[in-house]
Image: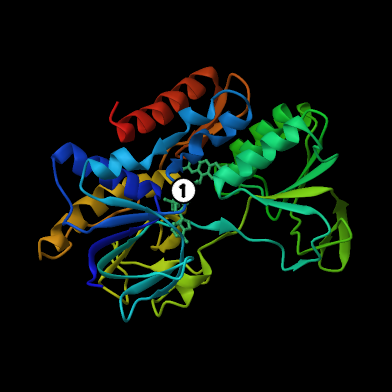
Amino acid sequence: MPPVPLLLAGAGHAHLVTLQRWRAEGYHAPVGSCLINPTAQAWYSGMLPGLLAGRWQAEQCCIELAPLCAAVGVSLRLGEITQLDANSQQAQLADQSRIRWQWLSLGVGGAPQAPAHNDHSITLLPAKPFAGLYQQCRTWQQQNAPQRLAIIGGGAAAVELALALARLLPATQLNLFSAGPLLAALPARAGNLVRPLLRQRGISYHEGVTVTGIQNGQLWQDTQVIGAADAALLASGNMAPHWLADSAMTCDATGAVRIQPNLQSSSHPTVFATGDCASLSACPHNGVQAVRQGAVLAENLSQVLCGDQATRQFKPPRHSLALLATADEQAIATRNGIALRSRLALRLKDRLDNGFIRAIRGD
Ligand SMILES: Cc1cc2nc3c(=O)[nH]c(=O)nc-3n(C[C@H](O)[C@H](O)[C@H](O)COP(=O)(O)OP(=O)(O)OC[C@H]3O[C@@H](n4cnc5c(N)ncnc54)[C@H](O)[C@@H]3O)c2cc1C
């Protein structure tokens, strides 16, 4: 089989923005270009806590990929990459088929990591993929909700999920275990705003504890028992898919592909990477950065597909706005060291989230 001109791997945020930009510009990808994704929809993470808290319906939080791809001449192939060889420029899928590429763009995200020692005595639910998280939480809502649910993680996603699950599963006792202070990546005031909220909603939290093992339904930090649970939600420690580190590309300690500011792999120039599966200095892993990378990716991919150099550079902004839904009528907004909680922040979050979905859908 001849190589495809462009293989888009995963419907990550930057790929959605790339396809949206190309549609707006009337650009058509070279014939044979394709997007591979395990599902026909892409979930928008920013709205997931609101979905679990009952503020949104599932169809408001996902994007159908087929019309977006069709608009720019990219075919959608449902499948999952399981192996990559960047030297011979080919990918292997779960169904054992192979695809060779001229240009590859990776937007496959990452997933939280399970504790190193795990005897599988309790259900472990990773926060990603989102479809699995949503389905399991809905099942728990209808039947057999765990009595004690541990939430492993203390960043924005873990806190938002804890607050949302307190609404969805009111009879479940929630215990949050954070390796560092809560919301450590945000201004300290954000943590100060969130602690009383967690207490008010009956969510216990433990800061400065790392869950290193799960045995007989107990959570361990090294040799010490730190809690017990019937199920645990994994919401920390993003790791890129393991096959990236085996691909011959230069990767960082989390398995994310090291990229240059133009989003090209620093070791293999036929590969671009964005979002949580890419590693660029001073660029944190979150949806906001991945979305911003999308505009740069759209331009650079169309340049290389025309035989030019990828010239546009991505510069991570020094300060960006973070908005955390608190599963009520308010949200916490942080920027430049300031944090506040208000109704206005939730209105802004809703406007930005809905605006993103509408822009990608082309509504
Ligand atoms: C609950 C939660 C809430 C969050 N809220 C926010 C927020 O409000 N703001 C914010 O900035 N960040 C938020 N984040 C972080 C944000 O979700 C991630 O940083 C963001 O999703 C990264 O996007 P991405 O483009 O790298 O990949 P993803 O959005 O994870 O997309 C990856 C895509 O690749 C596909 N894929 C995966 N493996 C394969 C494979 N092997 N082969 C082919 N396709 C594959 C997946 O199905 C998916 O479609 C949140 C995270 C969580 C867990």
Q: Nearer the viewer, residue 132 or 256?
A: 132
Q: Position of residue 68 (x, y in %)?
A: 29, 40
Q: Residue at x 60, y 36 (%)?
A: 190
Q: Is residue 190 above or below residue 262?
A: above
Residue 188 position within the rendered picture, expressed as x and y whole percent measured from the top left: 60, 42
The residue at which mark 1 appears reads as 39
The answer to which image quadrant residue 87 occupies is bottom left
Count of numbered marks: 1
Q: Residue furthest left?
A: 307
Quarter holding the N terminus is bottom left
**Can residue 111 be seen in this snapshot?**
yes
Q: How is the image coloured?
A: rainbow
Q: Dividing the image into 4 quarters, which one contains the C terminus?
A: top left
What amino acid does circle 1 point to?
Answer: Thr
The residue at 68%/61% (across/down) is: 114
Helix, strand or loop status at disc 1: loop
Which residue is at the front of the view, 294 or 285? 294
Viewed as shown, does residue 119 lie left or right of 355?
right
Residue at screen point 45% across, 71% down = 96
Name the one closer to the observer, 255 or 326. 255
Residue 252 in the image: state x and y as whole percent: 47, 71
Position in image of residue 331 (x %, y %): 56, 26
Left or right of 213? Residue 346 is: left
Ligand 1 neighbours mark 1 (CB distance < 8 Å): yes
Q: Residue at 25% across / 50% down in the picture?
A: 74
Q: Residues within 10 Å of mark 1 (few under 14, many from 20)?
A: some
Q: Is residue 191 visible?
A: no
Give left or right: position of 226 versus 333.
right
